[in-house]
Image: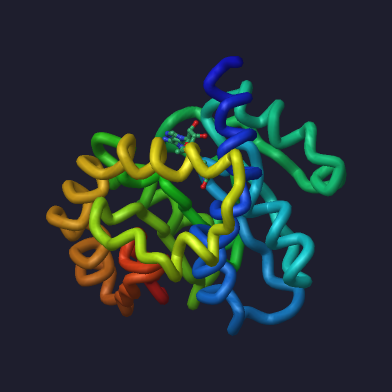
Amino acid sequence: MNMAQFFYYVQNAPWYFHFLKPVLQILEPLPDNAKVLDVGTGAGKLLELGKSQTSFHWEGADTDNEMLSEARRRPTLQDVPLHLLSPDSLPFENASFDAATFCSVLFLIPDPLPLLEETVRILRPNGRLVALTPTGEGNISPELIRQIGIHPQNWTFFLWRQMTSASGHDWARKGILAEFARQKNATYNKQIVFNGLAAVEWIQF
Ligand SMILES: C[S@@+](CC[C@H](N)C(=O)[O-])C[C@H]1O[C@@H](n2cnc3c(N)ncnc32)[C@H](O)[C@@H]1O
């Protein structure tokens, strides 16, 4: 199993829906035909959920072609454009999307500022940037375990937590998106979600 196949497996574990769900909630105020780009989409789970739960036009992008191949395996994504990226650049026209999402992506990039600048360029005026990041905090309460369900794929949850804790703490400490929003004169928001295990941040330009 390569990394991309492993990620496809993780994204399909039942708990992963609960992790991604807050991003869809933050996008709810967008109009019906809004164009949304999921950057670092990996195996495309957010696109699949977004397509089934919203009437937005979704596109996905990633720097890793093997990840995109996994996304292409999803029958529900056959008509969703999936773009291979060079790092730090987004091959789209200025002002061509209403929102861009980053789920577990920005905290992995050593210097995310060039990519954030690119995102501002491709967003329309009043566009929205949404980032979901593990916190490395939170607790695994009985309620959460019930919510996730007893399922053989649950080992993926504990592995995910172990693999993301240190970089999640680091991301929260740096406050990069809050500072970026301040510099752009945009509105910054943050909500702790998924039992404290993740944070969703969004910038309204
Ligand atoms: C941890 S995975 C998250 C995948 C998916 N967003 C999710 O929530 O499951 C991180 C993804 O970001 C992609 N990635 C890493 N650096 C990137 C960059 N500079 N631009 C776009 N995607 C990037 C990786 O190839 C990988 O698919």
Q: Is residue 27 left or right of residue 181?
A: right
Q: Is residue 118 left or right of residue 151?
A: left
Q: Nearer the viewer, residue 84 or 6?
A: 6
Question: Which image quadrant for residue 194?
Answer: bottom left
Residue occupying the far left of the picture: 173
At 56% from the left edge and 35% from the top edge, which residue is drawn?
62
Q: Is residue 123 visible?
A: no
Q: Is residue 106 left or right of residue 55?
A: left
Q: Is residue 113 visible?
A: yes
Colour convention: rainbow
Question: Residue 94 placed where, x, y %?
Answer: 55, 56
Question: Residue 189 placed where, x, y %?
Answer: 32, 76
With respect to residue 64, does 167 lie above or below?
Answer: below
Residue occupying the far top of the picture: 1
At 58% from the left edge and 58% from the top edge, which residue is drawn?
149
Q: How many marks?
A: 0
Q: Nearer the viewer, residue 204 or 191?
A: 191
Q: Quarter holding the C terminus?
A: bottom left
With respect to residue 132, does 202 lie above or below?
Answer: below
Q: Is residue 65 left or right of residue 103?
A: right
Q: Quarter holding the N terminus?
A: top right
At 66% from the left edge and 36% from the top edge, which residue is drawn?
83
At 60% from the left edge and 62% from the top edge, which residue is drawn?
97
Question: Residue 26 placed where, x, y %?
Answer: 51, 75
Q: Nearer the viewer, residue 45 or 116?
A: 45
Question: Residue 50 placed where, x, y %?
Answer: 69, 62
